[in-house]
Image (tube, grey):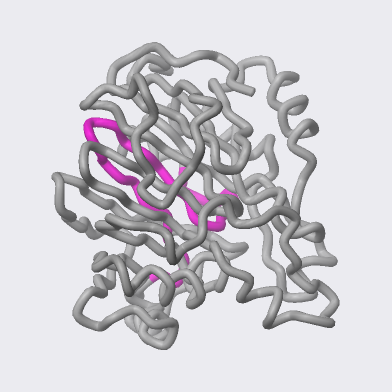
Amino acid sequence: MNITRSAVRPVSGTPLTGTFAAPPGAGPDEVTLWWLGQAGFALRHRGGLILIDPYLSDTLAEKYRGALFPHRRMHPAPVAPEAIRGVDAVLCTHGHTDHMDPGTIRALLPHNDPRFVVPRAERARALERGVPAARLIGTTAGERVELDGGVTVEPVPAAHEHLEQDGNGDHRFLGYVLTVGGVRVYHSGDCVPHDGQPERLRALRADVALLPVNGRDRHRTENGVPGNFTVEEAAELCEAAGIPHLICHHFGLFDFNTVDPEDARDALRRRDAPPSWTVPRVGDAHVLTPGGPTAKEDR
């Protein structure tokens, strides 16, 4: 496995603001990545800013107040969506509200004019959530989307907990392999292991995998909360697909659907041949450098 295709280094102590300014020391060819909590990420390269699955509101707490799973935040949003400026694109991997959030979408639009990339099977839901029809790009697995700044998006299937397609054969759950500034970043969306996944990803040669690690169980699934990879499964996918670096996410926001980050770190340390990995903190920046060495462990 090639572990030198890109470097991933944390940058601490840099306050996150709505401009998502690259941290001091980031070079012009480097990509800065921030974890926004849950499955949300921001990527900055040169002047361009991309958001993936941003959930920066309390939409779900309002929706599920008094329910079995009330969806109260365990931490505040790291940045207010109405304060964000300069967004070129918003990618939503599927239609669940913590990935396609009307509260975040509507707060972004007064000060930004981004393209929205969504599963074609969820086009109607995206329009209902406030995405302008003229800015919406529907896609499905096997296609390729070209965005400004030389950014490309290659959708792949995701299984949450199953592969699902609509009557036209378009996938309801997607992952995206983004090429940004010479770095290839795979965001799986909500996903569990499925047939053909390692082979497909190996062919796409991702440098970094952003994978959900909150796991799954019968109680959650039977009460409408489908699950994701375990930490071990996420590491196994990186190993099988030849992805050098794992960044874990989808934990720490809702108390019924999380894992302890220290348990995740311990599980990764115990593996005989783990990829290099990051169990991040919300709001921290990480700089991705094409072609540089990657540290084996990033706490």
At horizontal 49% and vertical 25% (from top left) the residue drawn is 11
The x and y percentages for residue 259 are 77, 45
Residue 96 is left or right of residue 127, and the answer is right
The x and y percentages for residue 88 are 25, 57
Where, by quadrant of the figure, is residue 107 drawn? bottom left
Q: So how many labels did they put on this image?
A: 0
Q: Is residue 59 above or below residue 31?
A: below
The x and y percentages for residue 251 are 68, 49
Q: Is residue 53 above or below residue 97?
A: above
Q: Nearer the viewer, residue 208 or 283?
A: 283
Where, by quadrant of the figure, is residue 236 drawn? top right
Residue 186 is left or right of residue 189, and the answer is left
Q: Nearer the viewer, residue 74 or 245?
A: 74
Residue 215 is left or right of residue 81, and the answer is right
At horizontal 69% and vertical 44% (from top left) the residue drawn is 230
Q: Nearer the viewer, residue 146 or 238?
A: 146
Classify the position of the N terminus by image quarter: top left
The x and y percentages for residue 163 are 51, 65
Q: Which residues are magenta?
A: 171-197
Q: Nearer the viewer, residue 221 or 99?
A: 99
Q: Is residue 253 above or below residue 106?
A: above
User: Within the magenta stretch, is there residue 61?
Assistant: no
At horizontal 43% and vertical 66% (from top left) the residue drawn is 82
